[in-house]
Image (cartoon, grey):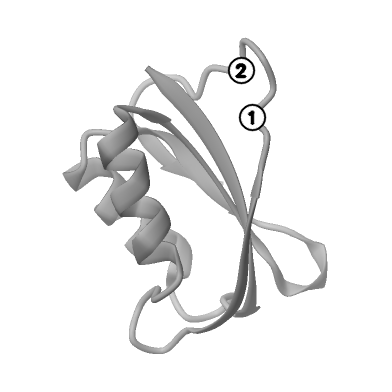
Amino acid sequence: MSARRWLISGRVQGVAFRAHAQARALALGLGGYARNLPAGRVEVFAQGDDAALDQLAQWLWQGPPAARVEAVHEAPAAEGEAPGIGFGVR
């Protein structure tokens, strides 16, 4: 099991990005969360199978229909960080 964190920028707040990310992650069997950050970015943390994480990473570049993703930066997940059960929106 692997864990990854992404920081997504562009028009990603106020367009249901977190809810769509949650639905996509749950469909892929991933645990984690999506949350809004200051300055209009969204952070997504996910843990699970590498192939599923790759699929989520590809989707993050698209996002929901109303989003306009400008950049997706992968950041290291903290060692030992566990997302809890399921995939939450914070």
Q: Nearer the viewer, residue 40 or 78?
A: 78
Whether residue 22 is visible: no
Toward the left, the furthest residue is 27
Q: Is residue 4 above or below residue 6?
A: above
Q: Quadrant of residue 53?
A: top left
Give the number of the disc on residue 48: none
Element type at mark 1:
loop
Quadrant housing the N terminus = top left
Residue 10 image position (x, y, % from top left) = 64, 81
Horizontal side of residue 85 vs 5, given as left or right: left
Residue 56 image position (x, y, % from top left) = 35, 52
Amino acid at circle 1 = Ala
The local crowd at label 2, few if under 14, some if 14 to 19, many if 20 or more residues have their Cα within 10 Å, is few
For marks 2 and 1, give the CA distance: 7 Å
Q: Is residue 67 above or below residue 41?
A: below
Amino acid at circle 2 = Glu
The number of callouts visible is 2
Q: Is residue 13 above or below residue 28?
A: below
The residue that label 2 is drawn on is 81
The local crowd at label 1, few if under 14, some if 14 to 19, many if 20 or more residues have their Cα within 10 Å, is some
Residue 76 image position (x, y, % from top left) = 68, 34
The residue that label 1 is drawn on is 77
Whether residue 40 is visible: yes
Instruction: Identify the residue at image location x=81%, y=63%.
Output: 38
Instruction: Identify the residue at image location x=33%, y=32%.
Output: 50
Q: Nearer the viewer, residue 18 or 61?
A: 61
Element type at mark 2:
loop
Residue 12 image position (x, y, % from top left) = 56, 76
Horizontal side of residue 22 vs 28, given as left or right: right
Circles 2 and 1: CB atoms closer than 8 Å: yes
